[in-house]
Image: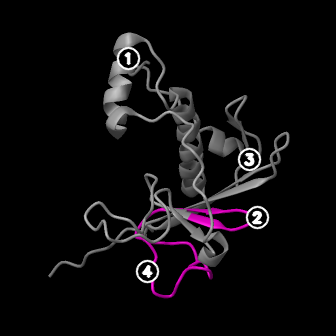
Amino acid sequence: MKKLSLPECQSSANTVTWEYPSRGNLPPLKVHWYDGGIKPLRPAELSHYLAMPNSGILFVGDKGKLMSGYYGGNPYRSRRNPDITRGYEGGLLLPEESFKNFSVPPQTLLRCEKENHYKEWTDACKSGKKTVCPVELGCEMTEVALLGSLALRTGKLLKWDSKTMRITNDNEANQLIAPPYRSDWNM
């Protein structure tokens, strides 16, 4: 019988935290990412009768919390189960008793027709019109996600300067941002 030697175990579950300083009138901000089955701590305000959603977003504010689905909407409402009416269309506000008289604000932001971002993007490419969610925002979100991946890969706390697209505290990690291509493979 052959003896197998396994490579060093790599975790497929991770957490990443991004910390933003205050910007103008905006206070400092922390963003936490959990994946691979890791979830944030259960909000103390969440009813013990409700399970934590399988995926979603938890916004923590000064006056309460908002649990929303990963793609928006309420994780406790379902098209398959329309009888479930906990919370609002946009999410579940916590603590629920503090938001019993909450009035949903009127819709002011544009929405995609039939919530089809793919068709909207294709139509924008063909017509030259802007999309409801600007492509530039997607670029910024990609930058944030890639920086999180870089932090996981290096296992280090990284400080990022988005203007220069450089890490300011680790030259080795900078080598991973734009690695040199072999001479036969030019961009």
Q: Which residue is depicted at the point 18% across and 78% down?
A: 2
Secondary structure of the residue carrying numbered label 1: helix
Question: In the displayed structure, does residue 119 sit left or right of residue 56?
Answer: left
- Examine the image and state in which quarter residue 182 appears: top left
Q: Earlier in the sequence, mark 3 or mark 2?
A: 2
* Residue 51, label in figure: 4
Q: Which of marks 4 and 3 is nearer the N terminus?
A: 4
**Residue count near mark 3 (Cα–Cα under 10 Å), binned few <14, some 14–19, many ≥20:** some
- Dot 1 amino acid type: Cys
Q: Mark 2 points at which residue?
A: 62
Q: Which residue is depicted at the point 52% across and 39% down?
A: 142
Question: In the displayed structure, does residue 65 sit left or right of residue 38?
Answer: right
Q: Identify which residue, 91 or 123, lies in the foreground.
A: 91
Quadrant of the frame with the C terminus: top left
Q: Earlier in the sequence, mark 1 or mark 3?
A: 1
Q: How far apart are marks 2 and 4 (CA)?
A: 24 Å
Number of the front mark, 2 or 1: 2
Q: Distance between the residues labelled 4 and 3?
A: 36 Å
Q: Mark 1 points at which residue?
A: 125
Q: Do the residues labelled 3 and 2 touch (CB within 8 Å)?
A: no
Question: In the displayed structure, does residue 40 sit left or right of residue 98?
Answer: left
- State the extent of the magenta-drawn residues as a range: 37-66
- Dot 2 amino acid type: Asp
* Residue 159, label in figure: 3
Numbered circles on residues, count: 4
